[in-house]
Amino acid sequence: MKLIISSIALSVLFFSSCQQAERKNAIPVQDTIPVKLMPLTATGEQQIIEATGVFSTDDETLLGFKNGGVIAKILVKEGDAVRKGQLLASVHTSEVDAKAGQVRLSVEKARRDYERASKLYRDSVATLEQLQNAKTALAVAQEDLKSVGFNQQFSQIHSPVSGFVLAKLANEGQVVGPGTPVLQVNGAGSGQWLLKVGVSDSQWARLKVGDKAIIQTDALPNDSLQAYVFKKSEGLDPQSGTFSIQLALQGKPAGKLASGVFGKSKIYSQGQTNAQGWRIPFSSLLDGNGKEGYVFITEDGKTAKKQKVSIQNMEKDEVLISSGLEQAQAIIISGSPYLQNGSAIRVQK
């Protein structure tokens, strides 16, 4: 009896050890990762470039003095309405006035010398050369007087337009050099409204003067303003690191705008893109460096494949891919962070 029980116990232990060995040698089943796909379709659609900037007018003017000096008076403040020809500021003119006095005395002396030389020439005492020299000296003195009068005139700043003072850039008593901006004015909306935006070099190259645009601003929340590319800068702005584009409004805005108001624009390039491209969500791009990146695609609906792609442009929530997806039918847009090349996937609807 004991022998039978021992045999049964040994059999149970042997069977249990075999099962454990089988479990250890079993190949684990790889977990499938749920993903979502987006079908890919090559596109040559019109390019839309989004850019932001601030409004201004084409008649904004920086005003300063022709000659430097100490500012005597500034008669306006920021936001003041001004009329064309109105006196806005002046500098102390003591130095210019003294110079003008000297020149007037020089003119009087030159005139006396010329009159004396004329009489002597008629009496055959002075030569023709002496008469001509006296005449030339008088002409030079008269031109100097005109120059001083011009400088006296521009010792004051008068408004060139009827509009508003946008900025006051200096104060009374301040010493300013020739041409230093003191005030900025515009024409109260009588000029052309412009939205000045900055774009990248690749975007600048695609845009042409005349391209259409749509502008939105919180100042006119219910309006979409029609505009067009009015001017392209020919150089890089060193402060912003972008190229400047000026968008001109078509017609007058329905509401009131002011210089400095923020605006958002969508610019539509004239032509269609000749190169084949694909638009994909920005979130599906991995390890992008501005020119290249990676995405996950699937060719059989069961396995993920990491694919290198070339980036043509980035536009807010989308990326335009120029190459790398020629053979792909769909791109994985959800679940990418959990994937590796060759990961098993389960497509979710």
Image (cartoon, grey):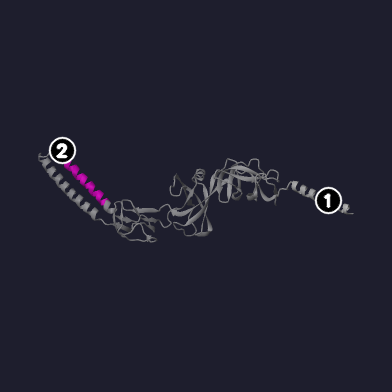
Q: Kindly indicate the quadrant of the structure image that contains residue 136.
A: top left
Residue that appears at 20% across and 46% down: 141
Q: Is mark 1 on a helix, strand or loop?
A: helix
Q: Which amino acid does label 1 sit on?
A: Leu
| Observer able to see residue 162 | no
Residue that appears at 79% across and 49% down: 17
Left or right: where 190 falls relative to 271: left
Quarter of the figure that contains the N terminus: bottom right
Disc sitting over residue 10 in the figure: 1
Q: What stretch is highlighted in magenta?
A: 132-150
Disc sitting over residue 129 in the figure: 2
Q: Which class describes the residues within 10 Å of circle 2: few (<14), some (14-19), or many (20+)?
A: few
Assess whether residue 141 is covered by the magenta stretch.
yes
Q: Are marks 2 and 1 in contact (CB under 8 Å)?
A: no
Whole-angstrom CA distance, mark 2 to mark 1, is 145 Å
| Tag nearer the camera, 2 or 1 | 1
**Residue 307 vertical position relative to residue 71 in the rendered view, above or below:** above
Closest to the observer: 6 or 258? 6
Q: Is mark 2 on a helix, strand or loop?
A: helix
**Residue 190 vertical position relative to residue 279 in the rendered view, above or below:** below
Please tell me whether the stretch drawn in magenta is mainly helix, strand or loop: helix
